[in-house]
Amino acid sequence: MLEDLAPRHAAAVGLLAIVPTIIYGLGAPGLAGYVSTLNVVIIFAAIYIAMSPLEESGGSGDESAAS
C-alpha cells in the first residue's frame, strides 16, 4: 500500500505537522509558535521540491563533445 504512494504525496503528509504547531502558536505567548509553523512550511516546501521529477535536457552538448 505504501509502495504505491508517490514521494511528493508522502511529503504532503508532512503538512499534518502544521496542526500541532498552530495549536502551540495559539497557546504559547510570543512568536515561538508562529516561527515553528513557518519552519514546518519551509521544510515541507524543501522536501516537496526535492522530490519533484527532474526535467530532461534536450541539448546538453555532451554528445557533440564526444565525437
Image (tube, rainbow, N blue to C red):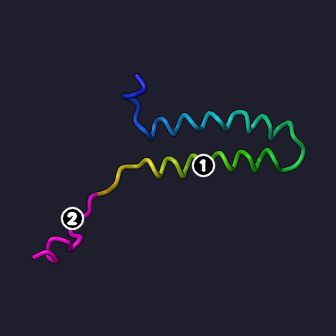
In terms of image quadrants, where is residue 37?
top right
The Cα–Cα distance between marks 2 and 1, rounded to whole angstroms, is: 31 Å
Q: What is the crowding at mark 2: few (fewer than 14 residues within 10 Å), some, or many (at least 20)?
A: few
Q: Which mark is residue 63?
A: none
Q: Quadrant of the N terminus?
A: top left
Q: Is residue 36 magenta?
A: no
Query: x%, y% of residue 57?
Result: 26, 63
Q: Which residues are magenta?
A: 56-67
- 47 with respect to 56 (left or right): right
Which residue corresponds to the image point at 27% horizontal and 58% vertical from the top-left?
Answer: 56
The residue where tag 2 is placed is 58
Q: Residue furthest front?
A: 66
Q: What is the crowding at mark 1: few (fewer than 14 residues within 10 Å), some, or many (at least 20)?
A: some
Which residue corresponds to the image point at 54% horizontal and 52% vertical from the top-left?
Answer: 46
Q: Is residue 63 magenta?
A: yes
The residue where tag 1 is placed is 43
Query: x%, y% of residue 53?
Result: 36, 50
In terms of image quadrants, where is residue 20?
top right
Element marked by disc 1:
helix
Q: Earlier in the sequence, mark 2 or mark 1?
A: 1
Query: x%, y% of residue 13?
Result: 54, 34
- The amino acid sitting under disc 1 is Ile
Vertical position of residue 40 compared to residue 13: above or below: below
- The amino acid sitting under disc 2 is Gly
Which residue corresponds to the image point at 57% horizontal and 46% vertical from the top-left?
Answer: 44
Q: Quadrant of the C terminus?
A: bottom left
